[in-house]
Image (tube, grey):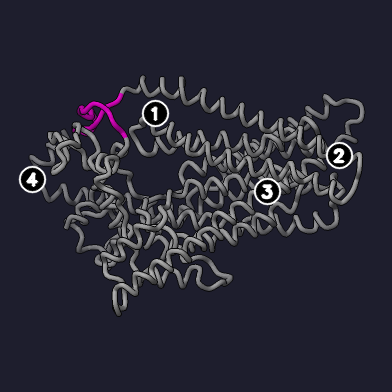
Amino acid sequence: QRLLYGAEDVGFFKEITTAPGEASTDANKHNFKEFQGNLGMAECQYIIKHELDNLRAKDEAHVPGYPKMKLYPGKSVIRRMQSKGILVQVFPLHEKEELKRLSFSWFKKIKLSFQPLDDIRHYFGEGMALYFGFLEYFTLALIPMALIGIPYYLFDWEDYDKFTVFAGFNLVWCTVILELWKRLSASLAYGWGTLSRKKAFEEPRPGFHGVLGVNPVTGRAEPLYSNAKRQLRIYLVSVPFVLLCLYLSLYVMMIYFDMEGWALMIHDEEPTFWTGLLLFIPSIIYAVVIEIMNLIYRYAAEFLTGWENHRLESTFQNHLVLKVLVFNFFNCFASLFYIAFVMQDMVLLRQSLATLLITSQILNQIMEAFLPYWLQRRRNKKAHKRMIKTMEDKELPLSEQVKLEADMSTYLGTFDDYLELFLLFGYVSLFSCVYPLAAVLVVLNNVTEVYSDAFKMCKVFKRPFSEPAANIGVWQLAFEAMSVIAVVTNCALIGMSPQVKSYFPESETQLIMWVVGFEHFLLASKFILTFVIPDVPKHIQIKLSRLEFESLEALKKRHQKEPVYKRLTYRV
């Protein structure tokens, strides 16, 4: 009964016998198709998590049983108990039979087929299913780029002029795939009931703190915090910190170029096989340093964003994503832009891009494939020892399962996974015309990523709480921003090619004007294309309109059955 009230509170949409979809309420639960199996495991977990997060202290002076653990009005009870060590961790347990079936259809057998997104959604929730759906879609979308890139690499490696055609194809590709993904994600979200779900009035995030007051919209008691104080923290602390980190990244980049010049000087003095290998050492060291700096900055950005004390989880995520993307973009791509447009050394650009991409992928595979496999082996040994202790029981008792899963790693969300895809998309869309094998390497990386991520979710991590989602959120905007930068970058690379320069032998100004005009034309075409291709397929638009119409009709019928004085009250 509590779950039903919770489903009504968070606004779940379910398929019913009389209409394509309707908001879940306790009163109309008998109208839903196969209702007992319709409220999935992931949805139940989300409801429970929602209720736990909204437990806030009112008149209680301390945690019951712990008089020294003070509580303040409006403070999150769960967060307070966790910070003081009373509550160690909260996580849902894995369902063994469900997990076994999901693992078998997902990653146990290597096969050329689509992922079981509906099963992933049922077990882990819509947010996780959309991530794996996007990973799969991105991998398939890269195949045309890879197929075109292979012959370019094999036959025209030294002929830079012909890469202008590849750059042109790149411009169209990065726009079309993002627009088509919007349509695919809308189709998935409609089938899962999250596309038409009205987002409930967002409650304060668990980490939000302030003086207890009354929300002017809901009339409920909740913490209040001055927006002016938050803005001061952002502009006087967070922004200078980000700028300082960007300066440090620039300083490290200049050290990398000094190392590159030193290696080149040694090779020129004595060109041997070993000095030839030495040319790749600076790029490898720089790629490792970039990964370390990104990791350290990630934790610093999360701490700063939490310290800014944002009220809503969505606002918190937006500020965190903005901080991380700005630094990661500058840290990963600044050296490539410098080589391409300041040094204008295409051979060095090709070498640096290849080294950065390959090194980062090797490091990611170590962290995401080999390390999880090693952790799983260790956990299996612990499980075997506990099985021996539990005599001849066929399966672990519940208490032992809790202890076993408590030792598993905690999944921190899809943030880092989307960030990795964002950077890979940048390598392909920005500079793949110089290194056509970039798409091939990313396809190979993503194929292993699908299996390694699936393995980690089922075998290495604790089961995460689900998050309903209708799309990939702010990451869609991030990928689109990258595609706009890709248009400018590729147009500039085309303008730098000797083939294009030969058409303007006397006037460099005319060349610049032509490149800028062409770039504006492509940007205009890109934005027109975003309007021409609807974000939601036509048949789903019709279903959504029909749902809205039937909801209004049902509301009218309900009002007609009520006494006249009640209907007048509603109108007033």
Q: Percent position (x, y) of residue 282?
A: 74, 41
Q: Mark 2 points at which residue?
A: 266
Q: Give the range drawn in magenta.
A: 208-225
Q: Residue 381 carries which label?
A: none
Marks 1 and 4: which is nearer the front? 1
Dot 1 or dot 4: first in sequence order is 1
Q: Is residue 500 left or right of residue 62?
A: right
Marks 2 and 4: which is nearer the front? 2
Q: Distance between the residues labelled 3 and 4?
A: 70 Å
Q: Are the residues at dot 3 and dot 1 in contact (C-beta closer than 8 Å)? A: no
Badge 2 marks a residue whose secondary structure is helix
Q: Mark 4 points at which residue?
A: 563
Q: In this view, does 291 lie to the left or right of 316?
A: right
Amino acid type at mark 1: Glu
Q: Name the residue under label 3.
A: 357
Out of 68 and 9, give the one closest to the viewer: 68
Amino acid type at mark 3: Leu
Q: Name the residue under label 1.
A: 308
Residue at 30 percent of width and 80 percent of height: 392
Q: Distance between the residues labelled 3 and 1?
A: 34 Å
Q: Is the residue marked by circle 1 packed among few (<14), some (14-19), or many (20+) residues within 10 Å?
A: many
Q: Percent position (x, y) of residue 503?
A: 89, 35
